Image: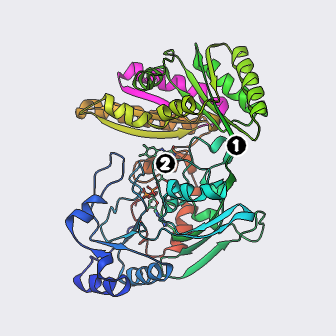
Amino acid sequence: MSHSYNPVSPEIVELLTQIVGAENVSTRAADLEARSNDQGIHPPQRAEVLVWVHDEQQVSRVMALANQQRIPVTAWGAGTSLEGNPIPLLGGIQLSFERMNRILAVHEGDFQVTVQPGIGYKDLNAQLQRHGLFFAPDPGANASIGGMLANNAAGIRTVKYGATRDNVLRMQVVLADGSVMRLGSRSIKQSSGYDLAHLVIGSEGTLAMITEATLKLAPIPSHFSAAVASFNSVSSAIEAVVAVRGSGLEPAALEFLDPVTTALISGSDGLNLPEKPTVLMEFHSAHQGHLQATLDSVREICAECGSVYFFATTNQSERLKLWHARHHTYETIVRANPGRKVSNSDVAVPISAYPILIDFIEANRRERGVSAYSFGHAGDGNIHVLYVYAGEQESAAAWAMNTAVVYKAIELGGTATGEHGIGLGKTQFMQSEHGQALQLMRVVKTALDPNWILNPGKIFVD
Ligand SMILES: Cc1cc2nc3c(=O)[nH]c(=O)nc-3n(C[C@H](O)[C@H](O)[C@H](O)COP(=O)(O)OP(=O)(O)OC[C@H]3O[C@@H](n4cnc5c(N)ncnc54)[C@H](O)[C@@H]3O)c2cc1C
């Protein structure tokens, strides 16, 4: 099914200016170029006009106009996606939420906050600190809440607190025709009708524009600890991951790093870790004594699984040093490979299949001679493979390996993407992963956006 679109004429630019004001409309090359690409490796594409919205009514009026004129509209949060999700592939209007970034209400007694979508989650957490609360999903990059909702972002703390989807109660959205909908409620328990809020979460701006969200918050823990364990084999490392998860100790992070990645971040951050399969962990508690007892149990569990190195700390600077190294893994890999491209792919499998997938990645790396680093959120069965390449031959080998890894993850009962979304980079795997359900997704898309003006070219190969 193909859809036809109209270009943005000077008359349309004038109508957009009437809706949001001249200072919030730009056709300047520099503005369009700055938002023509995300942090991934997909080719850039400029929109025809950039519109900064400030409130829901403006979003509604822009959408109604675009729908009537058959102009594509692609949302822009902070542009930190990795699969080309916010690239305005067919030009049209780029709807930026950068200036729609207020906290609307902190419902402290309910552990909730209601926000506009453009707020960065790090900025949100900085402001929530004085309430003793935080929004737990943590993708690392300074993403906006709207982008996190649209991609169903997850991250290091998902193993304890869930992904973005698990931390949203209610949203307001604007559909393609400009109509405004409230989805869900502020009640923790909801079983009333279809769960449309969670349908929109993870839809990458292809079903609706998110204009407001009420998020679940968690109390900031009083005490934190970090632990790191090294093993001689991936299977021992994952045995420890499963044992720690199954122990009832409630890890707040459970990360795997392959030996190459461990050696790199260890060298760059002065950690002195053995070059072996490594598991990084974090635990939270209300009491220091409880935390120490937890770490003693974790040490025992890791020893039983064959750890050859173990280090645990409740010291804040040591803990931050460890997590700084993990949080900056991507940047460290980029710095270590000047002049080469780095592409970050993610897949996820049931945790029991994790060692099989890691072995598959290792074997492919060796056989194909591809430079690749693998690490990820092992507690969720999620792995990131960072491919490093230069020139056509290496690029082709990296992409062939990525394709094989994604199909392997699907074959193992997993998914083509645990948290980065489909965007442009994973569309080719949708049929294999979803089969008949892909057609149902098209039916849903057409029902909500009959003219396919919302972020066209993403999720589906059209
Ligand atoms: C170094 C690095 C590490 C990363 N690590 C992780 C990680 O651990 N976990 C993880 O999940 N991700 C990770 N990411 C990816 C990225 O940060 C997330 O996908 C994030 O959710 C993107 O948010 P954003 O605000 O940048 O959104 P954008 O990239 O601007 O947009 C993302 C998608 O949301 C749509 N969108 C934006 N706002 C709205 C709205 N208001 N309504 C409807 N649609 C909207 C866009 O059209 C696009 O499809 C990482 C990225 C980098 C660069």
* Nearer to the camera, 23 or 361: 23
Q: Is mark 2 within 8 Å of ligand 1?
A: yes
Which residue is identified by label 1?
A: 222
Query: Which secondary structure is most common in the magenta stretch?
Result: helix
Q: Height in image: 104 above or below 199?
A: below
Of circles 1 and 2, the one toward us is 1
Q: Position of residue 454 (x, y in %)?
A: 43, 69
Q: Residue at x 57, y 36 (%)?
A: 377
Which residue is identified by label 2?
A: 420
Q: Position of residue 153 (x, y in %)?
A: 54, 51
Q: Height in image: 179 above or below 224?
A: below
Residue type indicated by callout 1: Ser
Residue 400 in view of the camera: no
For the magenta stretch, what is the residue range? 349-375
Q: Residue at x 67, y 13 (%)?
A: 306
Q: Residue at x 36, y 53 (%)?
A: 38
Q: Residue at x 42, y 56 (%)?
A: 85
Q: Height in image: 176 above or below 268?
A: below
